[in-house]
Image (cartoon, rainbow, N blue to C red):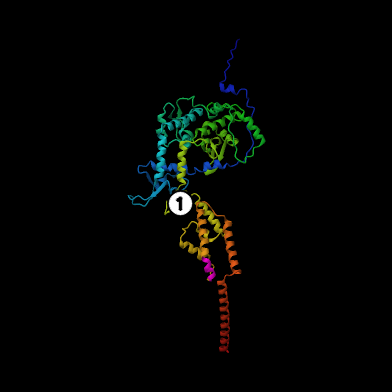
């Protein structure tokens, strides 16, 4: 009896890793987190920029280009405003104007955009409408679809990444229909990812030209192997075992993120290297080369790699940096930044920089330059309360008040100890000058320069020493006054003694 044995030929991906046998395992050490001030600043400088941009688009979509504050309050959650809408708009008066419409009977304030904000928005719309920028956006979406192993991404996930992809809010109508050969929106039969929108963006045609990673392009130019650029924060202490492991890890074969390598063991270094390459390519696709950690984990959940994403982000602090600024964790690709700024300029990021400059701009109000961003005011108020509680001086309580003549007079009355002598009267001009200097230094705290507590204590000690010096070394006028006072005291004592004697005679 003859038997026929059929042999299955493994594909090229399996043949590449047959001889590896997955002997290397993942590094199981721990690291001490070290802050990177430059990357933290790059994340923190865009604080409130995303909700501000959402509110700007929300107001601009109205035909009147204005909205009542009540409507903004109703949509606060969808706009992701960090605090009360009226406080948010007043925090940035260089972008939002508050006014009372004449046509309405109620005195409900309305919010509109300033001319400066409308000017930047018009430049942004021109960028969205340019063919070159649309081609870039289409290539970014196409790369994400080719990275996905089923070549589909739910629109709910794209909504999380829309801000970092640089997509306009109406990209489903303004961008997707213009590239029918790239992708299309289809309705899924299931209930959708996480029971959200069941529509997905589906790949139509694979592009071999775009299915080339950044690492492969660099290797074509330099030809120095597929080694990831590693840069640690200043003060990072690298263990010898981790240094040895990382050196061997860099020598492992590179697997393109556009290839399906999910057959690799999840607990092997080969799989870890492929996942790192996948995260590396995704962050390069994003315009700012960073995004919130939750956005990556949501995408990883769709790809079936959520746990591997979390492990790779923690295990490679020299490639990815986790910033905890602005109330969330942000993943920053170190390779994309140089000295805290993007290594490659992009027109979309230039527009964001213009918004940031406008947020931090100064405006004219009552003839004074007033900073538009008052984010440090609350912090300064708490510092002032601490200074008042520790006895830092009575002038510190008037930092946020108006510096007029009445407030200075009240401060002088509070500081005077009740002496009506001519010596104190001569010292009043000096006190006025000293209080003006104190008021000017106190005004500096409003813009973020808090005067140290020891300075106020030194001023009080200097004042006390000056009073003691005047007591020990009185001036000529004070000496004359003292002599006059002594003479008056002698006369008054003689009069009192005579009156007491006279009263005694009357009694007897």
Outermost residue, front side? 476
Which image quadrant is residue 465 in?
Answer: bottom right
Outermost residue, bottom side? 508
Disc 1 target residue: 370
Instruction: Please provide percent x and percent y for residue 24.
Output: 64, 29
| Magenta-highlighted residues | 421-428
Q: Report the predominant secondary structure element of the magenta stretch.
A: helix
Residue 200 visible somewhere in the drawing: no
Is residue 9 depicted above or below 304 in this figure? Answer: above
Tell me what residue is drawn at x 45 percent, y 25 percent. Answer: 205
Instruction: Please provide percent x and percent y for residue 147.
Output: 51, 29
The N terminus appears in which quarter of the rendering? top right
Judging depth in this view, the residue of 364 and 307 nearest the camera is 364
Q: Residues within 10 Å of mark 1 (few under 14, many from 20)?
A: some
Left or right of residue 145, residue 245 in this image: right
Judging depth in this view, the residue of 421 and 349 nearest the camera is 421
Tell me what residue is drawn at x 57 percent, y 73 percent. Answer: 479
Instruction: Please provide percent x and percent y for residue 401.
Output: 47, 58
Instruction: Please provide percent x and percent y for residue 409.
Output: 48, 64
Q: Circle 1 — which element?
A: strand
Instruction: Check residue 422 for magenta coloring.
Output: yes
The C terminus appears in which quarter of the rendering? bottom right
Left or right of residue 222, residue 157 in this image: left
């Amino acid at each position: 009896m003859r038997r026929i044995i059929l042999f299955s030929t493994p594909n090229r991906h399996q043949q590449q890793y047959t001889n590896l046998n997955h002997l290397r395992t993942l590094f199981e050490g721990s690291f001490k987190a070290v802050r990177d001030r430059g990357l933290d600043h790059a994340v923190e400088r865009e604080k409130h920029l995303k909700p501000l941009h959402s509110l700007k688009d929300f107001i601009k979509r109205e035909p009147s280009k204005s909205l009542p504050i009540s409507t903004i309050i109703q949509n606060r959650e969808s706009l992701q405003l960090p605090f009360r809408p009226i406080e948010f708009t007043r925090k940035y008066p260089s972008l939002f104007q508050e006014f009372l419409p004449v046509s309405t009977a109620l005195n409900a304030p309305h919010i509109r955009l300033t001319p400066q904000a409308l000017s930047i928005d018009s430049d942004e719309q021109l960028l969205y409408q340019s063919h070159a920028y649309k081609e870039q956006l289409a290539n970014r979406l196409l790369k994400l679809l080719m990275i996905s192993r089923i070549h589909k991404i739910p629109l709910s996930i794209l909504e999380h990444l829309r801000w970092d992809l640089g997509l306009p809010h109406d990209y489903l109508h303004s961008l997707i229909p213009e590239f029918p050969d790239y992708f299309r929106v289809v309705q899924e039969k299931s209930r959708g990812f996480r029971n959200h929108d069941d529509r997905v963006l589906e790949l139509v045609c694979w592009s071999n030209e775009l299915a080339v990673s950044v690492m492969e392009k660099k290797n074509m130019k330099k030809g120095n192997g597929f080694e990831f650029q590693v840069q640690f924060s200043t003060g990072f202490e690298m263990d010898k075992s981790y240094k040895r492991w990382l050196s061997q890890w860099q020598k492992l074969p590179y697997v393109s993120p556009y290839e399906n390598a999910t057959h690799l063991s999840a607990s092997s270094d080969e799989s870890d290297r492929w996942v790192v390459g996948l995260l590396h390519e995704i962050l390069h696709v994003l315009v700012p080369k960073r995004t919130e950690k939750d956005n990556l984990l949501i995408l990883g959940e769709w790809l079936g790699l959520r746990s591997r994403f979390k492990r790779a982000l923690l295990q490679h602090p020299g490639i990815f940096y986790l910033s905890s600024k602005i109330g969330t964790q942000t993943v920053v690709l170190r390779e994309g930044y140089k000295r805290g700024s993007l290594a490659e300029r992009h027109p979309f990021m230039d527009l964001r920089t213009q918004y940031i400059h406008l947020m931090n701009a100064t405006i004219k109000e009552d003839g004074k330059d007033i900073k538009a961003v008052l984010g440090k005011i609350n912090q300064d108020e708490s510092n002032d309360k601490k200074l008042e509680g520790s006895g830092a001086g009575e002038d510190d309580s008037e930092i946020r008040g108006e510096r007029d003549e009445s407030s200075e007079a009240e401060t002088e009355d509070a500081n005077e100890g009740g002496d009506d002598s001519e010596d104190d009267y001569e010292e009043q001009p000096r006190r006025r000058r000293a209080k003006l200097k104190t008021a000017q230094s106190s005004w500096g705290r409003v813009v973020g320069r808090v005067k140290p507590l020891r300075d106020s204590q030194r001023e009080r000690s200097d004042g006390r020493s000056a009073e003691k010096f005047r007591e020990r070394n009185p001036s000529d006028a004070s000496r004359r006054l003292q002599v006059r006072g002594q003479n008056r005291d002698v006369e008054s004592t003689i009069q009192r003694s005579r009156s007491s004697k006279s009263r005694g005679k009357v009694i007897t």
